[in-house]
Structures are given as structure tokens and as C-alpha cells.
Image (tube, grey):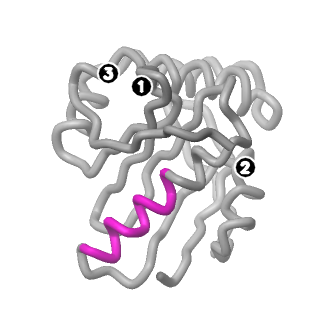
Amino acid sequence: MIKDLEIREATLEDLTEITSIFRDTVRAINSRDYSEKQIEVWSSGADDTEIWENRINDLYFIVAEFKNEIVGFAHITKGCNLDGLYVHKNYQRRTIGSKLLRIAESHIMAEGYEVINADSSITSVDFFDSHYFEQIKKQKKSYKGKGFAYSIFSKEL
């Protein structure tokens, strides 16, 4: 557990750290469950800076900061969909993801929604299970020409 963790809304100044966490986490953590080619394609999403800028500007997008370093982030789309939650590869299993999730859930409830939905990589199935999400279905989706297995989760708030 990390004390003195600050959760705040992301700004464009955070873009480099956010995309670095995304790339490094996918390569180090998700590589357990996906092929090398899938990881290469997935992590290249960090290079789509315009997409990341739009997320920061247009979505509810929060970062977790510890000792002036961003160690995780989460963002919500369409009111109640957790579209991304990533924790720095060196800060896994230290409650950062749980704290980001709690803040996201609070925001969703404040917006008047009674449910949170999440599309999850197969790597994070245990995380969502441990936070009382129900796995609705398993699917595959295509990203940049590669197929990816993932799960759809939902939880009543």
C-alpha cells in the first residue's frame, strides 16, 4: 500500500507520463497473456498522441501521483464505461488500481448512473473479479488488424 497517493484530473502536461505508463505496462504486464505481435500492436497505441490528447480533454480522466510521479491512470467514456485503467509496471498490487477505481465509481454515481461497465484485457480479469464485477461475456475485438481476447464486466453501484 502506498501512502500519500494523490488522485487528480489529468492535464495535457501529463501526456508523456501517461503514454509511457500505457506502453510499459502493456509490454511488461500484459505480455503474460498476449503474443509478442499483439503486444507490439497494442503498445503502439501510446504513439497516437492525438487520441490521448482528446481523452484528456474530453473525458473524465484521472491520474494517481506519488512523489511527483504519475503511477497510474483511469478514464471514463459514455458516462459509465471505464475505458482504461493502468498502473505503472513497478507499482502493481499496491492498491493504486483500487483507489483509481473507487474514484471512477464515485464520479459515475455523482453523474447519476447506477452501474459501471468495463472492457477488460484477460490480464485484469482477477482485478475486476476481486472488486465485485460480474463478467458479462468474453469477446474478441480487432485493433490495428490483430485480434484480442477481452471480457466485458459490469457492476451495480
Residue 15's label in the rendered image is: 3
| Badge 2 density bin: few <14, some 14–19, many ≥20, Cα 10 Å | some
Residue 122's label in the rendered image is: 2
**Amino acid of disc 2:** Ile
Residue occupying the point 73% across, 30% down = 29
**Amino acid of disc 1:** Ile
Q: Position of residue 132 (x, y in %)?
A: 67, 75
Q: CB atoms at circles 2 and 3 under 8 Å apart?
A: no
Q: Position of residue 137 (x, y in %)?
A: 66, 70
Magenta-highlighted stretch: main secondary structure? helix
* Label 2 vs label 3, nearer the camera: 3
Q: Would residue 10 be found to the left or right of residue 63 on screen?
A: left
Q: Quadrant of residue 24?
A: top right
Chain part drawn in magenta: 100-110
| Badge 3 density bin: few <14, some 14–19, many ≥20, Cα 10 Å | some
Q: Position of residue 2 (x, y in %)?
A: 62, 39
The answer to whether residue 99 is above or below residue 38 is below
Q: Residue furthest left?
A: 57
